[in-house]
Structures are given as structure tokens and as C-alpha cells.
Amino acid sequence: MFFYLAKALWFVLQPSTLIALLIGYGSILIWTGWARWGRRFVNVGAVLLLLAGLSPLGNALILPLEDRFPRTDLDTPPPPTGFILLGGAEDRLVGTARKAPTLNEAGERIIEAAILAKRFPTAKIAFSGGDAGVLYKSSSEAEGAVELLTALGVPREQLILEAAARDTYENAVFLKEELAKMGLLGPGTRWVVITSAYHMPRAMGAFRTAGFNVEAWPVDYRTRGQADLTRPFDKVSEGLRRVDVASREWVGLVAYWMRGRSDALFPGPRPSYLTSCDQSAAGQGEQQSQPASPCPPSP
């Protein structure tokens, strides 16, 4: 229910939709006895359209998300047990119809996973992603991921696929269950999440709430950094898209926190003594051997 409710609410609440509704509704009111209010709605909508579409607002909204988690040091032992690749990088609807690989703006997730698979040939690549479509159903993202990754040179035996998750929290919960069944969780294991930089705070919060301790490897940066805080957009569509993407994450962070799907409103890096804690066994019913441990308990 949460999945469908979130999709429906976001369709209405996303900035581009709200702006369109303001202008459209105002245009209708102009031809009625509420013409004054109609003009106000149109004027406000036009100002918001220019502000969101041309100003650096989108960059200002997405930059704190992108900068929240730095990349973990992969050269520090122990070597990674595996990398968790979150779905969202494919357009399965188009790809299935065209019978061709179809990556979207987040395609760097797939590319980076292939690069890391070659750098760490003994590490597993665990992909999590099903069909998140509502109006239009397609095949599981996992099907497309295995085709793309093997075509990029990743051995099939190096891949682990989870094809039921529809959102970030389900990614964490379902994949943890899958890896636990395979005996790939426990003391000494090390898992690293690959996802878009702006999405990393919500992903880390969801994995922590699921009792799955992971490290961050952000990709798919949309900004250069602080320099883009003053860089306007030269296309209204691009600026509006950036505002939509960033707003979706901020709203998602609030919703996840309120629903108990994230350990914090704005998850951030933890001290080193906490990131070294392995809580994977707690999800299988085992208790911490040392009650005084600084590691937070699994839910």
C-alpha cells in the first residue's frame, strides 16, 4: 500500500506538476467570475516556472544530498565481500519493446558496477530491483541488469539477483534475506552500496533500519560541487527536471523517516567504530555477545 500511495502522492506533489496545475487552473478561472484569482494563479505559476527552470535552485537542492556521503576507502582491508547495485538505471519498458539495452540518466550505476567487478574479481555483484511500474508493467530490472553486466564482461557466477524489490526499503530488506540464505553475511563480511549520489542518504538510512551495515560508493553525480550553486540552467526543462529529482529525494527522506523506514531524517556518515560493526547476524536471531558494544542493535 505504501508503494502505491507514495507513487500517487508524488505525481501530484512534484514541483513540475504543481506548477502546471497552477497555470492550467488559473487559465480556466480567468474565463469565469474568479478572473482575479485566475490571474494570480497564472502569475505565480509563471514565476515558479522561471525560478525552477532557469535559476540554480535545482543545484542548491541536490548538492547537500550528493555531498552527504563520500566514497568509502576500498583499499582498506578487508576487501569487499560484494557490491550492492540498486535498480533504477534502466528503462525496462522501452528496452523490452526494442529488445535493446536502455539506460537512463542513472546508467553510471551499471557501468561503475562492471568496473568494480573487474577491480575486485572475487567480490559479488548483488543487484536488487524488480518492476516498479504502476500504470505500465514491464519485466524485472534484474533481467536487464544481468544482460548488461555480462555483456560488459562480468562473469555470471559473480552476480546475485534479487528481482522483487520495488523501492529502496525493499531493496535493503529483500537483499539482506537473500544474502543471509547464501551465507554471505556475518562477521568479517563487507558490503558496499552503489547508487546515485543524491539517492545515497535515503539508501543508507533504509539499509541501516533493515539491520544491514553497508558502506557507500556514490555515483551519477549531477553537479560539479559548490561551483554549481551559482550556475543557472540554459534550458527550462533541465532546471525543472533537477528540481523534481532533488525534491523527490527530500520528500522521500521525510516519508521514510516518518514511516520508520530510515534511521534518521537525514542520514549521514557514522564514526569508524560504528561502520565496522557487523549486525547481519542479528537479523537471523543471534544476539550481540557483548552487551556493552557500541554497535546499535538491529531492529
Image (spheres, rainbow, N blue to C red):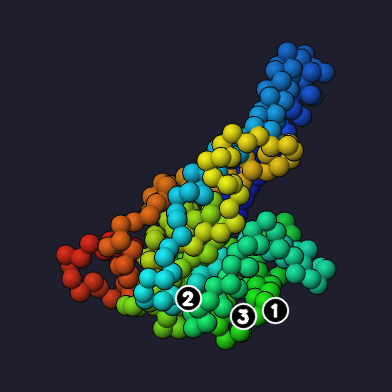
The residue labelled by disc 3 is 154
Q: Quick one: SS at disc 3?
A: loop
Q: Quadrant of residue 134?
A: bottom right
Residue identified by numbered label 2: 82
At x 28% / y 76%, what residue is drawn?
286
- For label 2, count other residues whose C-alpha is less than 10 Å away and answer few (under 14), some (14-19) or many (20+): many
| Mark 2 to mark 3 CA distance (whole Å) | 13 Å
Q: Position of residue 115 (x, y in %)?
A: 58, 72
Q: Hey, which residue is sitting farthest bottom in the picture?
A: 157
Amino acid type, residue under disc 3 in the picture: Val
Are there few (<14), some (14-19), or many (20+) residues within 10 Å of tag 3? many
- Identify the disc placed on residue 151: 1
Determine whether 112 is above or below 24 in the image.
below
**Residue 5 location (% of width, % of height):** 58, 50
Q: In this view, does 59 lie above or below 186?
A: above
Instruction: Give me the residue at 65% from left, 80% from top.
Output: 153
Q: Where is residue 120 in the image (x, y as percent from the top left)?
A: 50, 78
